[in-house]
Image: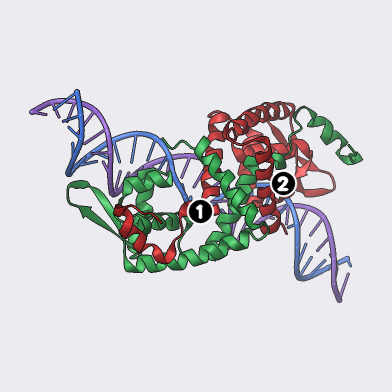
Chain colours: A red, B green, C blue, D purple
Amino acid sequence: MARSVTSLRAAEEAECADLALEELIGYNLKRAYVIFHTDFREALGDDGLSQRAFSALSLVVQIPNITQSALARRLGIERSGLVAIVDDLERRGLLQRGRVPGDRRVQALLATDAGRRAFAEAVAAVRTHEEKVLAGLSMAERAQLLSLLRKIRTTAGGES
Amino acid sequence: MARSVTSLRAAEEAECADLALEELIGYNLKRAYVIFHTDFREALGDDGLSQRAFSALSLVVQIPNITQSALARRLGIERSGLVAIVDDLERRGLLQRGRVPGDRRVQALLATDAGRRAFAEAVAAVRTHEEKVLAGLSMAERAQLLSLLRKIRTTAGGES
DNA sequence: CCGTAATTGTTAACCTGGTTAACGTTTATA
DNA sequence: TATAAACGTTAACCAGGTTAACAATTACGG
């Protein structure tokens, strides 16, 4: 318990709650998230896809004719929040809203050719981005991290 | 490679970019962050401390007379962004801005007695919150996660 | 059948958590 | 001593959501 003289008073005042912020997983999670988010944006360029647009496009490419509601559910956001994302992707010509025969409520989302091309390019950029941000971690550590994050999602994530 | 008939076309269309969103660390990191953030808020009550206010107060308690600039630097945000946070904490009577003799530019932040009490209570709530969200992880896994997140911060985090 | 409930997409208003740019004050430095 | 730099602050803005309401449509119980 070697403490410097100058921080003696600090130690006293915090003694009843000796919690270093840096020991909190939530705090470190947030800081790491900010790093990823920031680097993602600069990796994909100033008018490239945002994280959320990339996620949405990813699912639309891989699940053709997915419904907006289903997409929102998968992304863990509200339907209303998805509208702006889909608006943006449609404005860029990366996907199309299509009415589906049989249910005139839903909008079936389908990626365009340009959308699939843009997604492929984005995937490359995202891979480089992750490689850069995770440079300090071994492959085993990355797999571990992925597994731990997913475990949090499955146990604490309310995916009704 | 057993694929259902209905997803055959999906597989074809995504073949050039066979990246499942769920395999991306960045995506899982964001989802986990959202889980923590959401649970933090409901754990600390409707007019309890926010994540950022808690972080700020934590450092003010443990580093008496820290400067606003220094605090912002530690939290990884801009000085301007910290003003509202400190305003809020001061309005709640949890800390005080104090002029320091020798440099009339700086605001030295000092937690009040109420601030230290509120912090101690918040720490208990935060501990319960982390315990809840991390219930699916063993102690070893939690230590691993913490270590991995910090490794990201130290290697990729631009702490000039 | 028919009325009621549920679902879908959408808009509007709002909130959180920041950023950048500018400014006055004060201190450091060439 | 002039110029630069640092501090706290404000204003304007932005990203990424949320909640509440709504019209259109579909599902369902009686």
Q: Is residue A40 above or below residue B77?
A: above
Query: Residue B6's x, y, as percent?
Result: 89, 40
Which comes sooner in the sequence, label 1 or label 2? 1
Q: Quadrant of residue A40?
A: top right
Of all chains, the one bearing label 1 is A
In the displayed structure image, the side of residue C3 where residue A26 appears, left or right: left
The three-letter code of the residue at mark 2 reads Leu
Query: Residue A107's x, y, as percent?
Result: 74, 44
- How many C-alpha atoms fall within 10 Å of the one at disc 1: few (<14), some, or many (≥20)? few
Q: CA distance from mark 1 to mark 2?
A: 35 Å
Residue A23: give its label. Answer: 1
Residue B78 seen: yes
- Total marks placed: 2
Residue A71: give its label. Answer: 2
Q: Looking at this rendering, what residue extends furthest in the front direction? A: A2
Query: Residue B124's x, y, as percent?
Result: 50, 67
Label 1 SS: helix
Of all chains, the one bearing label 2 is A
Query: Residue B134's x, y, as percent?
Result: 63, 58
- How many C-alpha atoms fall within 10 Å of the one at disc 2: few (<14), some, or many (≥20)? many
The three-letter code of the residue at mark 1 reads Glu
Residue B44 seen: no
Q: Is residue A16 above or below residue B72?
A: below
Front-most of D9 and D6?
D6
Q: Residue at x 27, y 53 (%)?
A: B108
